Amino acid sequence: MSPLIFNLCFNTFIQFIKQEKYKQLGFSPHDENDRLFHPVHWFQFADDAAVVTTNERENQFLLNCFSRWCQWAYMVIRLNKCVTFGIKKFSSRSLQFQPKLLINSELVPPVKKNESFKYLGRFFNFDMNSKDHKDFLISNLHALLKKIGTLNIHPRNKLLLYDRYLLSKISWHFTVADLGKTWISENLDNIVTKYVRQWLDLPISATISSIIPSRKNFGQAFQLPSIKFQQCQTTLRSSLRSSGDETITKLWKNTNVGTNIQYDIYRNTKQTLKSIRDEHTSRLQSQLPSQGFIISFLLEHSLKQLNSLWSKTQSKLPANIFKFSIKYLNNTLATRKNLHVWGLSATSDCSFCLQPESLLHIVAGCKTYLDQGRYTWRHNSALSFIAQTLQSIKSAKLYADLPGYLSPCSISGDSLRPDIILSTADNVLYIIELTVGFETNLNNNARRKELKYRPLLTDLANDYT
């Protein structure tokens, strides 16, 4: 049955119990001034119903009306999906009891003492706390993360599954359950962090903050449960605030206190997410200098128009190189310096030159690597890829300082020999000089190369544009 037809049909019963003789039934809530509202006895959301009364007799009466209507409408009440829950006052104490309510002469299963029931995704118990809901979330989260972890797929796809599938599975709980951001951060965030570290082969000391920024800011746009929780709360508060129902907007005003204030400052989830990501980026730069200095430097000096290109390129890397790139950016590769800090190496010195083996030392500072030609091989490998790409340009002549290509010396001379010269048919000359250095040396290397080849540009200015 379609939702529209169901609503049209079920509305006949709702109109029936709205009659004056039934309005006195149910529970009467109070407002902030302790004034009584009209009694409420029936809550309906789609095909889920809750009957609330002050005694069993009234509840049974409403259930009898509902049973007769279902027989008339040829609808079936699934007793195995129904429960009863009761609280009574004995002397001066309120205690849970098991109501005896019948549907079609069959007993509706009562909720046992100290147990809870679930309605519209939320757990309710006698203590009116969220213990069962929290236990359910922890258990469910472990199961889903474990399932994703066992899949033989690229780690990037595991992160996508987590973002698009798992977070959507728990988002409803973040809206309906009485959960706090602190509890989620201390419990759910820690669980997710443990699994993500396994997927990316990150050491225990690695911070997840490095993958939270957006992809254009060298992160993975990753969201911890606490981040999703803040978005859900922002959506909830925004819905209350912008509701066309005066009662709902009054509810928003009356609850604009305590922890809700931090969510009411945001107009939408996009604004919330940007604020959180900016906070994590700032944390990388100010509080985690060891793991955040590469990303901090790239954010400050990289060309913004090329950042999206990095994101696309990284997403296409093989699994092992993809994980390597993440560990490189947050400086958690197994260098001797890191191994020594982690207590896995007796020394932090390079085994070749006996200098402290940091990431900078490996990438661009080891004299032994330089003498062995390792840096030259890396430089020429990147240069070869660029040269092969430029060969596809039509009506252009390519010169490259590599075997198998015309030598740039035929244009530049022997004293200054750039890596690549590209001459086009309209007499435009492009000079490319490649430097594969460490990120923190980017500006210095660019300035040094510019000064080196400025005389050459001056000499060739009269012959080329």
Image: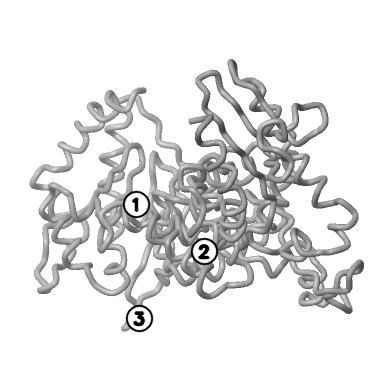
Identify the residue shown where x is 13% and y is 49%: 245
- Looking at the rendered structure, the secondary structure element under dot 2 is helix
Residue 143: image location, x then y, percent = 65, 51
Q: Nearer the viewer, residue 244 or 303?
A: 303
Residue 128 seen in the current view: yes
Say which label, 2 or 3, has the lower sequence index. Answer: 3
Mark 1 Cα-neighbour bin, 10 Å: few <14, some 14–19, many ≥20: some
Q: Return the disc, 2 or 1, that comes first in the chain's sequence.
A: 2
Which mark is on residue 269? 1
Q: Which residue is mark 3?
A: 93
Question: Distance between the Cα atoms at labels 1 and 3?
Answer: 44 Å
Kindly identify the amino acid type of the residue bearing the numbered disc 1.
Thr
Mark closest to the chain's N terminus, 1 or 3: 3
Question: Mark 2 or mark 3, which is nearer to you?
Answer: 2
Cβ atoms at labels 1 and 3 below 8 Å apart: no
Q: Quadrant of the N terminus?
A: top left
- What is the spatial separation of the Cα atoms under label 2 and label 3, in whole angstroms? 27 Å
The residue carrying pointer 3 sits among few (fewer than 14), some (14 to 19) or many (20 or more) residues within 10 Å by Cα, namely few
Three-letter code for the amino acid on which mark 2 is drawn? Lys
Q: Which mark is residue 134?
A: 2
Q: Position of residue 165 (x, y in %)?
A: 54, 42
Question: In the figure, 74 relative to 256: above or below?
Answer: above
Up the image or down, 228 lies above or below 68; here it is: below
Residue, x 52% and y 27% (percent of image)? 428
x then y, percent, for residue 218: 55, 52
